[in-house]
Amino acid sequence: MTTMQEGLEKAAAHFSKKKVLVTGGLGFIAGHLVDRLTEWGAEVTLLDARPEYDGDLEYIHGDVRDYDLMSGAVKGKDVVFHFASILGVEKIQLIPLDVMDVNLGGTVNALKACVEHGVGRIILTSSSEIYGEPRVIPTPEDTLPSPVSIYGVSKLAAEAYCQAYSQQHGLQYTAVRFFNVYGEGQAEEFVISKFLARVANDEPPIIFGTGEQVRTYTYVSDAIDCTLLAAASDKGINEVFNIGGAETISLIELARLIGEISGKPMEPEFREFGDAGVREKGREVFARIPSVAKARAVLGYRSRVGLRQGLTRTYHWYLKNS
Ligand SMILES: NC(=O)c1ccc[n+]([C@@H]2O[C@H](COP(=O)([O-])OP(=O)(O)OC[C@H]3O[C@@H](n4cnc5c(N)ncnc54)[C@H](O)[C@@H]3O)[C@@H](O)[C@H]2O)c1
């Protein structure tokens, strides 16, 4: 079996000189992906709805719902990483139709354009949210999906479209289901960023509900390692992989760990779900813990950054950049 290091070396050789489009390319996880791909010598084009970009890569400003724009961006590419998406618990509840429109409609446009221009493979970023409250824990990929959020529905439907396009048109795809990715550059509305911001300001992290919810948090470089291993391997063709870190922790333990790392140990503050405005009781999935046995067996994936190390890096980044 190939080791992770050998797999990454093969992936680096695979992507060197490849023409790659990254939709949602100015986003948090995509930013880390793009750094790795450019380091490996890929020719990367970014497409994003954000108007501002001051880097050196080719940048296409626009919306994945615009088919002509997407088709023009996809033309001539070897691989498409489709990261553009609407996410975030609060945002999703406010604009449910846009979520379907962008997450599913944007994916369909990407698939159509890939078929039109004969692109080698599309990588879809899916989510642990497709499982809803999982029936099996740790959750393997073949667990019956049961999404409880519109976001989860949009991602599940996007996966199904990939499968249908591959069967009808021979398009190759790889779907990666990320589990709670965190790290440098993540937006403020996600739990780790929120906890870090509170602690940095000497305020206790706020927990909605009992804080007993458990999650496997994935440091962003682990997510990128696994995505690239899957994207470069023949064993990743028309397959779906869970991508997760090595450690699982409750929200209370996470809040305490962040306090400890920052040198400001403190107890979290508890609130009822309703206190968060649009956040509603009953929405929160209790356990999100992946089985990454498939990625380990097929791709040789291993998490390389533990939670304490990843949180420490992210905290220092936050202090420098806030
Ligand atoms: N962060 C996580 O923990 C996590 C977990 C599961 C899945 N994912 C998936 O991974 C991908 C990247 O997530 P992220 O955390 O980096 O999010 P992000 O919000 O930082 O990145 C998404 C990017 O998509 C762009 N975008 C949104 N709508 C667009 C549109 N209509 N047209 C063009 N661009 C548009 C945004 O401007 C943004 O730059 C997404 O597909 C997300 O659903 C993330």
Image: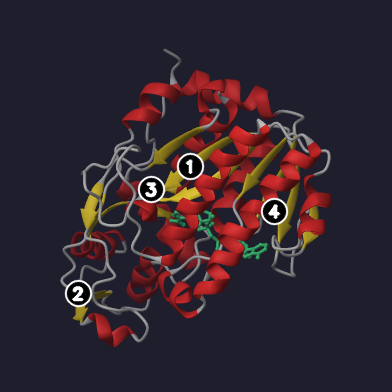
The residue under the point 80% across, 50% down is: 71
Give the residue type at disc 3: Thr
The amino acid at mark 1 is Val
Question: Which residue is the site of mark 4?
Answer: 109
Residue 279 is tagged as none
Can residue 24 be spotted in the picture? no
Foreground: disc 3 or disc 1: 1
Question: Which is nearer the eye, 169 or 22?
Answer: 169
Residue position for label 2: 209
Residue 248 located left or right of residue 35 = left
Q: Where's residue 213, x and y in %?
A: 21, 61
The residue identified by callout 1 is 176
Of labels 2 and 4, earlier in sequence is 4
C-alpha gap between disc 2 and disc 1: 29 Å
Q: Are marks 4 and 1 in contact (CB under 8 Å)?
A: no
**2 vs 4, front mark:** 4
On residue 218, which mark appears?
Answer: 3
The answer to whether mark 2 and mark 4 are in CB contact below 8 A is no
Amino acid at dot 2: Gly
Chain-order first, disc 2 or disc 3: 2
Q: Which image quadrant: the N terminus?
A: top left
- Label 3 CB less than 8 angstroms from ligand 1: yes
Distance from label 2 to label 3 (Cα)? 23 Å
